[in-house]
Image (cartoon, rainbow, N blue to C red):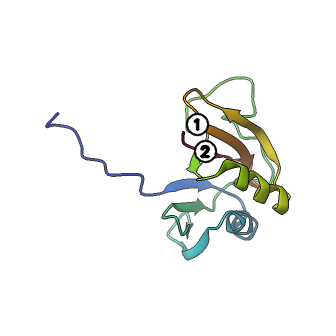
Amino acid sequence: MANNIHITGVAHLGIRVHDLDRSRKFYQQLGFELIAGPVGPEPVAILKHPGGVEINLILNAAKAAAENILMDVAEKYPGYTHAALAVRDLDAAKARLDELDIEITGGPVDYPGGARGLFIRDPDRNVVELYQPA
């Protein structure tokens, strides 16, 4: 279709967090490194993974420990529920999570067609899926 916007990929994921040091340490365990920030009025810290994925930690969550309203309450609200990060080997990723003592909160799940995934939570209860395509 000629009128479609030509999207070439995902530029970054924005994740609201309470404490930069706590969140930075968590995401560094997954391989992300701080490349800029905090900057801007929110403020935002920019982390990048060697695989090319960028996340923006938005440092304005009001509380250090709060429910994830999209995932932890019975009523379902619209919004993004999780970020899925592609991995080559889910078993190797799971083994590394175990070594790092990062709790797996869901899965591993076998999806139709051969894909697999598992779920973890960051310190602010944001859900991250590690996803191995078929």
Q: Is residue 22 above or below residue 1?
A: below
Which residue does the numbered mark 2 point to in the structure image? 131
Residue 130, image x, y percentages: 64, 48
**Secondary structure found at label 1:** loop
Quarter of the rendering occupied by the N terminus = top left
Question: Which x, y percent locates residue 76?
Answer: 65, 25
Give the residue at the far left of this rendering. 2
Crowd rating for badge 2 (residues with CA inside 10 Å; few <14, some 14–19, many 20+): many
The residue drawn where x is 73% and y is 64% is: 19
Q: How many numbered tags mark residues here?
A: 2
Q: Nearer the viewer, residue 54 or 131?
A: 131
Picture quadrant of residue 55 = bottom right
| Residue depicted at 60% across the width and 45% down the height | 131
Quadrant of the image containing the C terminus: top right
Which SS class for mark 2?
Answer: strand
Seen at 67% across and 48% down, the residue is 90
Foreground of the two, 75 or 115 = 115
Foreground tag (1 vs 2): 1
For residue 109, above or below residue 95: above
The amino acid beneath tag 1 is: Ala
Of the numbered discs in the image, which one, if any, rests on residue 115?
1
Question: Is 68 left or right of 114, judged from the image as shown?
Answer: right
Q: Determine whether 66 is above or below 30 in the image.
A: above
